[in-house]
Amino acid sequence: MLQITPQMRILVAIEAVDGRKGIDSLVQLCRETLDADPFSGCVFVFRSRSATSIRLLAYDGQGFWLAQKRLSKGRFRWWPTGKGPARSLEAYQAQLLLAAGDPDTKAAPMWRRVS
C-alpha cells in the first residue's frame, strides 16, 4: 500500500502524459523531463491527457509502486500551470488532489497546537 506522509516530497508533472505509459516510461520521464531522481523516494504524480485519471509513481527501496485513480464521472479540474516541469505539493494538498479537489484551497494549517 502506498501511504502519503507529511515527510514525503511530492512532485506533480505539469505536462499531461500518455495514459498507456508504464513504470519504465514514467521513470525515464522523471529523469529527463522533471530532472528528478526516481529512486529518491519522492512521489511523482502524472495526469492523463483526457484528465480523467492520475498516476502516482514511487520507489520504496525494493521496487516501484504505480497507483492509478480513474474517475468514473468528470475530470480532474485542477492541475498546476507554470514554466517549470513540475510543482511541489504538501501531503495534505496531494490528498485533496486525489479526491479530485483543488489543492490551492485554504485549508487548516498543517500543524497546530492541541490544547
Image: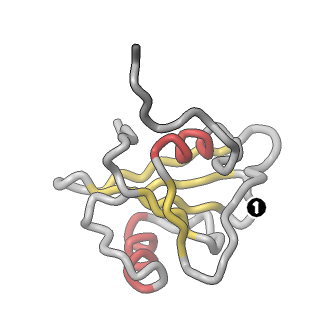
Residue 60 vs residue 18, the one in the foreground = 60
Image position of 86 (left or right of 43): right
Tell me: 73 left or right of 44. Answer: right
Where on the picture, by quarter, is residue 49? bottom right
Q: Residue at x 37, y 57 (%)?
A: 9
Residue beneath the point at 62% across and 46% down:
97
| Closer to the camera in the image, 70 or 80 | 80
Q: Is residue 103 above or below residue 32?
A: above
Name the residue at 56% across, 46% down: 93
Image spot of residue 32 (x, y percent): 42, 86
Residue that extends furthest to the right in the rendered view of this protein: 74
Residue name at image x 64 percent, y 83 percent: 83
Quarter of the rendering occupied by the N terminus = top left
Q: As drawn, is 14 to the left or to the right of 34?
A: right
Residue kind at label 1, given as amino acid type: Ser
Q: Quadrant of residue 17?
A: bottom right
Badge 1: few (under 14), some or many (20 or more) residues near its Cα, within 10 Å? Answer: few
Q: Position of residue 24 (x, y in %)?
A: 38, 71
Please, which residue is most extreme toward the top here? Answer: 115
Counting every numbered tag in the picture gives 1
Which is nearer the eye, 21 or 59? Answer: 59
- Judging from the image, the colouring scheme is secondary structure
Pick out the residue farthest to the left: 62
Q: Nearer the viewer, residue 34 or 106?
A: 106
Q: Position of residue 84 (x, y in %)?
A: 57, 81
Instruction: Residue 40: give x, y in percent of width and height.
Output: 26, 65
Tag 1's secondary structure?
loop
* Image quarter in which the C terminus is found: top left
The residue under label 1 is 50
